Image (cartoon, coloured by chain):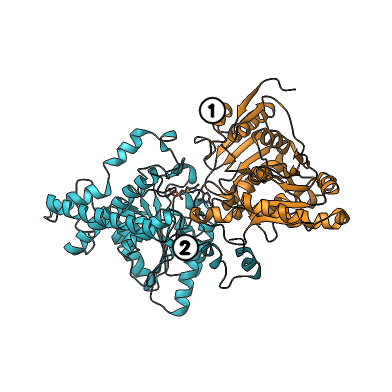
Amino acid sequence: MPQNSKKLNMVQAINLALKEEMQRDKDVVILGEDVGRDGGVFRVTEGLLELFGEQRVIDTPLAESGIVGVAIGMAAYGLKPIAEIQFMGFIYSAIDQIFSHASRIRNRTRGRFTCPLVIRIPYGAGIKAPDLHSESTEALFCHMPGVKVVVPSSPYNAKGLLISSIRDPDPVIFLESTRLYRLIKEEVPEGEYTIPLGRARIVQEGRDVTIIAWGSMLHRAIQAVEGFDAEVIDLMTLVPFDEEAIFKSVKKTGRVVIIHEAPKTCGFGAEISATISEDAMLYLKAPIIRVAGYDVVMPLPKLEDYYMPTEGRIRKAMEEVMKY
Amino acid sequence: MPEEIIESLNVRYINILNENGDVDESLMPSLSQSEIKKIYELLILSRTFDRYALNLQREGRIGTYASILGQEASQIGSAFAIEKSDWVFPSFREMGVYITLGYPVYMLFQYWSGDERGMQTPEGLNIFPLCVPVGTQVPHAVGAAMAAKYKGDKIAVICYFGDGGTSKGDFHEGFNMAGVFKLPVVFICQNNQWAISVPRSRQTASKTLAQKAFAYGFEGIQVDGNDVFAVYKVVREALDKAKDGGGPTFIECVTYRMGDHTTADDASRYRSKDEVEAWRSKDPIARLKLFMEKNMLWTDEYQKEIEGKAKDMNDEAVKMAESVEKQHFEEMFKYTYERLTFRQIKEMKDF
Ligand SMILES: Cc1ncc(C[n+]2csc(CCOP(=O)(O)OP(=O)(O)O)c2C)c(N)n1
C-alpha cells in the first residue's frame, strides 16, 4: 500500500500516475502534440520528457488521426501507448481510427491482436475557452462497442482510474475536465493504487433521491443537493457503467435526477434513464429527470453560463421528483 | 532498360525587398505609390490591432488571442491581391487578412471577447469565420473553388493555414482534389516556424513545404513571407492564373511568429531568445518603411499621422465592441437550425 501522500490538483495527480506507470512498465509511452518539450498545453505531461526521453515521450506532428492510428499500431505490436489529444473538439478526425479500428481489432482478429491504448482528452466547458475548446461529446464514444469511457472527478480518482486504464487490455477514452484541472486539491498517495473501471462511487448516501453525475458536473450536483436527503453517485466509468450501484440506489430512493454537461438529446443520461426504466421501473416513484446541456452548438464564452446546467436547474429537478 | 530520371522538381524562392529597404527592380510588382502607402497603412493598422488585442486580453477584456506579430507582410501582402468577389477561407491567425479585406475591426474584437456575432461576416464580403480546428478548412476552399468553376464564375478561392496544418490529412485530401480537378484555388501557408512548441523541422522531413504541391500535380513556390512585395506579387500571379483556368498554386510564406502561440502560451519554454532576436531584424514593416523613405514616400509626420489614425480606429472599434447590447439567451438556440426544434422550444422555457 502507498505510504506518502500529498495534496495535488488533477493535473499533478495525472502527471504522477503517468510517471509511476512509466517507471513501472517500459512499454508505456506517450505521444501527442506538444506533450514533450512543452509538457502539454495543460502541463499534464510536464517533466516526463526529461525523465523518460524522446523515445517514450513523443512530440508528434499536428495530426490527430495519425496520432491515434499510430498508437493503434504501437498497441497491437505490444506497447502501451497513451495518446494525448489537446481538446475534445480536435478528436473528430481521429474518430475513424477509433471506431473503425481501435474498437474492433480484438473482435476482428478473434483475440489474436488487441489494442490496449489510452486516449487522454481534456473536455468540457467552464474555462471561457475559444470555439471547439469546450466540447463534451462523450456519448459518441459510449455508443461504440469496443471502447471504454472513463471520466474522473477528482485528483484522487483520476490517478487510480488512469492507472487502471493504462493496464486495461482494451482501448480507453480517458476524459479530463478542464474546469477541474486546477480547481480542487486533494490528498493523493504516492505509489500504486488502482480504482477499478466500471465501478461507481457513492459520494454521499441519502434516502429521497438519487443524483447521478460524472466529471465536473458531479461538483455542481454536490453543491445543489444541500438541504435534500440525496444519494449522490459519481459514475466515473461510463462504459461499462455500474448498473448495480444505480439499481441499488434506485431501490432505496425511487427517484432519479441525472446531470450531464453534454446536450440532452442522445446524451449518456438517456442510456442510464432507459436502463433504469427497463430493469428497475417498479421501484420508481417519480419520472426520471435529466438536467443537461441544451441542444445547441456549444457557445463561445459569452453565452457559456447560459449553456451549463446550473445549481438552480438541478434543484428544480429535485423539487420536481420530490412532488411524487 | 536503363534507369532514368522521369521527374525532377524545382522549387522557386522569391524575395524582392531586402532588410535594407532595397528592391530587385526586375521582380518588382506594379504597384502605384498610393497603393504602396495603402499597404503600409494596413500593416500599421494590423499591428496596432494586434497590440490592442494583446493588451485587452491582459486586462481580461477579451479571451485567448492569437497574435499576428511578425506575420503582417504575409497577411496584408496576400490579402491586398484579393478581389472582392474572391472567396477566402482563413485559419484562426489571419487578423491582418480580415482587416485588409475591410472586415469591421470592432467585430474582430467582439469575436475574441467570446461573442459569436463578431463572426457574422457582413454582406458583400466572402470571408469565412476563423477556423479553429487546424487544417480542416482546406477541403472547404477546394469545394468552393469547385462550385465557382461549375458556375462559371471568374473568381479564385484563397485558403490560409500554418506549417502545422500541412501535417493534417485534410490538407492532403484537399490538395489532391484541387490538383485532380485543376481548381481555381490558391493555398497560402504561413510557415511561421512553430506550431505551438513543435518546430517546422518536426512537422515534415521534407526540405520545404512548398514542394508538397508537386506531389499533387501543381506548383509550390516559396516566398520571403516578411517581404510584402514578394508575397503580393506571387499571390497576385497565382490568383490570375487560377482565374485563367491554370489551376491551383501553393505558396509557402517563410515568416516568423514573434509572439507566443496565443495568450495562453509561453514560448520561452521551448525556443531561444537568440532565435527570436535573429528574426527581429527581418521585420516586415521596418523594411517597407526603409524602402519608402528611400523613395520619398515616408516622413516622420506621415508616420505620426497614420499611427494616430490606426489608434483612433482601434479605440473606436474597442468602444463599439464593448458597447454592443448583451446577447440574449435566444442567441444560443437561434442558429442551430433555420427553425427551432420542439425540444429547443421546450428548453428555452428554462430561462
Ligand atoms: C485539429 C487541431 N488540433 C490541435 C489544435 C490545437 N492547436 C491550435 S493551433 C496549433 C498549432 C498550429 O500550428 P500552425 O498550423 O503552424 O499554425 P500557427 O499556430 O503557427 O499559426 C495547435 C496544435 C487545433 N486547434 N486543431
Label 2 sits on a secondary structure element that is: loop
Dot 2 falls on which chain? B
Residue at x-position 38% and y-position 58%: B108
Q: Are marks 1 and 2 on the same chain?
A: no
x and y percent of residue A197 in the render? 76, 40
Q: Quadrant of the C terminus of chain B?
A: bottom right
At mark 1, the secondary structure is: helix
The image shows residue B242, relative to residue A70, as above or below, that is below
Q: Nearer the viewer, residue B32 or B313?
A: B313
Q: Is residue A5 left or right of residue A112?
A: left
What is the drawing colour of chain A?
Answer: orange
Judged by depth in the image, the label closer to the viewer, 1 or 2, is 1
For the residue carrying disc 1, how many other residues have a C-alpha within 10 Å: few (<14), some (14-19), or many (20+)? Answer: few
Which residue type carries mark 2?
Gly
Residue A137 in sight in this render: no
Q: Is mark 2 within 8 Å of ligand 1?
A: no
Q: Amino acid type of disc 1?
A: Glu
Shown in cyan, the chain is B
Where does the image place residue A56, in percent across and percent down from the top left? Answer: 60, 33
Q: Residue furthest right?
A: A282
Residue A217 in sight here: yes
Which residue: 24% across, 55% down?
B312
Quickly name the residue at label 1.
Answer: A50
**Residue A110: percent from the left, percent from the top?**
82, 49
The disc at residue B217 is 2
Q: Is residue B208 left or right of residue A96?
A: left
Label count reads 2
